[in-house]
Each structure stands twice: as structure tokens, then as C-alpha cells.
Amino acid sequence: MLNNKKCKLYGINGIPDHIHILCDLHPNLNLSSLVKDIKVASNLWMKESGLFDEFEGWQEGYGAFTISVREKETLINYIKNQKEHHKKETFMEEFKRLLNENGIKFEGEII
């Protein structure tokens, strides 16, 4: 799906409560449309595949961050090892920390 949108995928991995995707964003796309398309396509695939019986659908929101090219390999490795990382820091702890580090107020519900 990302290839069809002229976006390059660098890394993807998930654990039960979230996924991480590292990709570039083609200049002709906006982020919210890309996320919507990813959610729709993956939702359909997950339900049709029969591999994810407990999957009920994606949450309404999402988080997106930009990175520098220098950080790409570090982030790819993080994505590969996110299961281990989240043994030390939960998704919500990490998300709130990233928002705080970037001066963004958390406005969502506690999951």
C-alpha cells in the first residue's frame, strides 16, 4: 500500500496495543490521509486473513513524529526490538514522554 502511495517503508513492527511504522511521506500526500489509508487497508487485511481473531479495529487517533536522517538506523533498530523496549516502558509512558520532550500537551484519554 505504501509503495502505491510512493512512500518508502523503512521499518514496521507491532505489539498487541500498537504498531510503529517508519516511512517517508511523499510530498503529494498529507499525513492524515496516509494514516487513514493504512488503517483501512490493514483493517481489511487483518479481518480477511483470519490471523487476528481478537482484532476489533484501530483506535480513532494516531501519533506521528518526524526524525532526522541521522536517526533513521537507530529508529529502525528500535522498531525491530520494540517488544523488549516496552518491557521497560509502556506505550503510554513512552508516548507521553515523547510529547513532553517536544513541548506538546497530552490531550487524550488514558488508555
Image (spheres, rainbow, N blue to C red):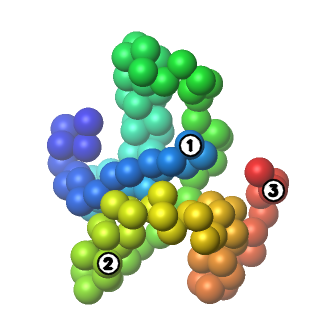
- Give left or right: position of 33 versus 95: left
Label 1 to label 3: alpha-carbon separation: 17 Å
Give residue 97's quadrant in the image: bottom right
Residue 12 at what x, y percent from top left? 34, 52
Residue 49 visible in this rendered orientation of the protein? yes
Q: Write down the residue under mark 2.
A: 74
Q: Could you tell me the amino acid type at mark 3?
A: Ile
Q: CA distance from mark 3 to mark 2?
A: 28 Å
Q: Which mark is residue 110?
A: 3
Give the mark nearer the N terminus: 1 vs 3. 1
The residue under the point 37% across, 77% down is: 67
Residue 2 against residue 8 in the figure, above or below:
above
For image coordinates 24% across by 54% down, the residue present is 9
- Work out whether residue 32 can be spotted: no
Mark 3 touches mark 2? (CB < 8 Å): no
Horizontal arrangement in the rendering, residue 33 relative to residue 86 (left or right): left
Amino acid carrying label 2: it is Thr
Quarter of image, res 78:
bottom left
How many residues crowd around disc 1 within 10 Å: few (fewer than 14), some, or many (20 or more)?
Answer: few
| Comes first in the chain, label 2 or label 1 | 1
The location of residue 64, given as percent across then percent down, is 49, 62
Regarding mark 2 in the picture, which secondary structure is present there?
Answer: helix
Q: Nearer the viewer, residue 92 or 100?
A: 92
Which quarter of the picture shows residue 8? bottom left
Tell me what residue is drawn at x 58 percent, y 35 percent. Answer: 58
Whichever of callouts 3 and 2 sits on the residue coming sooner in the sequence is 2
Callout 1 amino acid = Pro
Between residues 15 and 100, which one lies in front from this camera angle? 15
Q: Which mark is residue 16?
A: 1
Report the quarter where the N terminus lies.
top left
